[in-house]
Structures are given as structure tokens and as C-alpha cells.
Image (cartoon, rainbow, N blue to C red):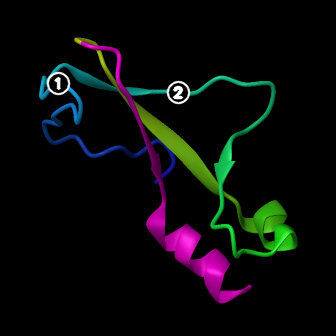
Amino acid sequence: MKGQIMSIEMKCLRCGGTNVQPSDLQSTGKIYARPKQAKFVTVLTTGAPVSALTCLDCGHVELLVDAKKAKAMLKSA
């Protein structure tokens, strides 16, 4: 999923606008999502990167994670 946000017209979950654009989150390091039950070692080796969509009408930011990777982390827990 990294860098592959669907190209279909997206609607903002907050305002319903269609001016939604793929975005990057910026931090001092990479941002990963992990299910709470996943082992920490699993996260270090197979963390699921976070992608974002930003509504340019209202500023709402939607975060997305690769569901297959998140499920795989639970299986190895």
C-alpha cells in the first residue's frame, strides 16, 4: 500500500467534500501502526506504514494502513 492510495474520487469523512489529496505525515522518524496484541519484535521487523489523505476543504486528515500487514502481525503474535 505504501505510496499507492486509490485513484478513485474520495469523499472527506468529515465534510463530504471531494477535494481530498494523498498526503505524507512528517515526523522525526517513520510512523507505523500496530495492533495492540502484536509482539513488539514483530512490529520492528514488519511494521505497517501509515499513509494519509487530507481534505483541502476542511483540513480533516484520514490515516490508512495496509490491512494485510496489520493482520499478518496478529498472526505472528
User: Vertical placement of 54 versus 58: above or below?
Assistant: below
Q: Is residue 5 left or right of residue 19?
A: right
Give x and y (percent) for residue 65: 49, 54
Residue that sits furthest to the right in the current view:
41
Q: Residue at x 15, y 42 (%)?
A: 8
Look at the image and tell me in which quarter the C terminus lies.
Answer: bottom right
Q: Is residue 14 left or right of residue 28?
A: left
Give x and y (percent) for residue 50: 56, 45
Q: Residue at x 73, y 38 (%)?
A: 30
User: Vertical placement of 63 versus 53: above or below?
Assistant: below
Q: Is residue 32 magenta?
A: no
Q: Report how many numbered discs are placed on residues in the image.
A: 2
Instruction: Specify the segment rendered in magenta.
Output: 58-77
Q: Is residue 74 left or right of residue 59?
A: right
Label drawn at residue 47: none
Give x and y (percent) for residue 70: 56, 69
